[in-house]
Image (spheres, rainbow, N blue to C red):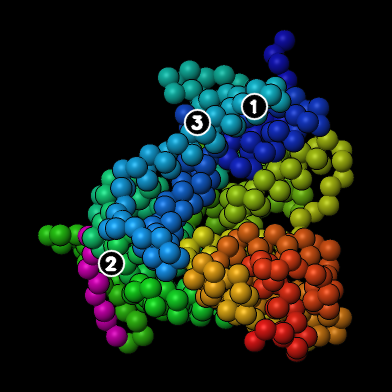
Amino acid sequence: MAETFDVVIIGSGPGGYVGAIRAAQLGLKTAIIEKDKRLGGTCLHRGCIPTKSLLWTASLFHHIKESSDFGIDVANPTVNWANAQKHKDKVVTKGANGIDFLMKKNKITVVKGHGRIAGKGKVEVTAEDGSKQTLETKNIIVATGSVPKSLPNVAVDHKRVMNSDSILGIDRIPKSIIVLGAGAVGCEFASVFNHVGSKTAIVEYMPALLPIEDADVSKELDKIFRRRGIDVHTGAKVEKVEHTADGVRVTMTVGSETKTLEAEILLSAVGRSPVTEDVGLNKTAVQVDRGFIKVDTLCRTSEPNVYAIGDVIPTPMLAHMASAECVMVVEHIAGKNPQPINYDLTPSATYCYPEVASVGLTEKKAKERGYDVKVGIAPFGAVTKSAISNESIGMIKIVSDRKYDEVLGIHIIGPHATELLAEACVAMKLEITTEELAHTIHAHPTLSEIMHEGAEATLGHPLHF
């Protein structure tokens, strides 16, 4: 008799592998399918982790160049890009080995190959050598993630025109680069190459950098990027991309004006597309809208016992969101009655320099929801700790409800913003008021004092500016 699993998960990214671990902890017999050679998905191999490694190298180089300000003389520092790539690969390998260990520790069956739903309770896996096997299961979770999107008129050849996958393997620091797209991915890569010495331009169709962030934060990032020497073009529509003798030429319209930019490399970073083709959805009642799988608040599809999580559903395309969704799903399967995710509390983190991090509603969204909004903005210059590392840049913005004083959103741009965000996440999960946040004692001197100063500013009585 064939082995039957309680859960089969297609895809081993941060949604799939985390969900598999939780399922095993709950006593569910679990299998996970992965077509890549290593477990971990985009996040570990082509996304979050390798990009943050390169961002660390770039940021460290920036600080080393100004180290004489801190009393340390370093003569003519240079970036050894080959070693930066080796460090990145070492970090990724360590992460992949860690996931392998966790699968064994939790007795999760790992099946390598392309997984497709083959009917009710069946998943067919095609191995690299073409051989096939079918897994019997009570529940299926589609966690196949996403791939880089490209514009119809921008042909990615992975040589002169790269995407976020191929740019990670670039063997040199380009003399110049144009980054197309100013979301998190675009801003992060623009930050990397600007710091390591590439002449950098960033082009965005929307009117602001990081268009999903609060408008004041986007304006602040724009100002700092320009100060760093990044050539920023927002509200720009790319008309064509041509190869030149030395690289690429981008022709774009900004308002009624036509502009051209030339560079050695073009990075296309215009978003990601869900991987929902060729996973067997045609053999189910699963409904798809514009490539995304339609689900309810517990990530159930319209096919009984088939769930979908992460980048394949129309929720924020974030690693931590995929993890949270898959944990919720397996807890539901195990009868634990989990609460649906409150997507208003989705943390957003962008690791450009300075970092940008937020949770909750922007000022604009809060007003659209009908709140009587009050806001407070405090600069990092008000926090002495930031001056120690020459990082008195950026600010915090707190959005609150005037009637009940509940904090609706916290938006940070500045040093270590992505780490400071954790306090904001906990505070908002507990439905904190601005007054409670202001009355929370923060250690001195720390960067976290920006949270306290922001709350005081929102109440109308900042202490340090």
Q: Which residue is mark 3?
A: 38
On the rendered image, what quadrant is the C terminus found in?
bottom right
Residue that mark 2 sits on: 199
Residue 206, x across and y down, in percent: 46, 75
Q: What residue is rendered at 25% in x and 72% in y? A: 261
Magenta segment includes 223: no
Mark 2 element type: strand
Residue 276 placement, left or right of 74: right
Q: Label 2, label 1: how many angstroms apart (C-alpha)?
A: 44 Å
In three-dimensional space, the C-alpha distance between marks 2 and 3, rounded to whole angstroms, equals 35 Å
Q: Nearer the viewer, residue 184 or 331?
A: 184
Which segment is the magenta one?
Answer: 257-269
Q: Magenta: predominant secondary structure element?
A: strand
- Amino acid at circle 3: Arg
- Give whichever of discs 2 and 3 has the lower sequence position: 3
Q: Is residue 90 above or below residue 379?
A: above
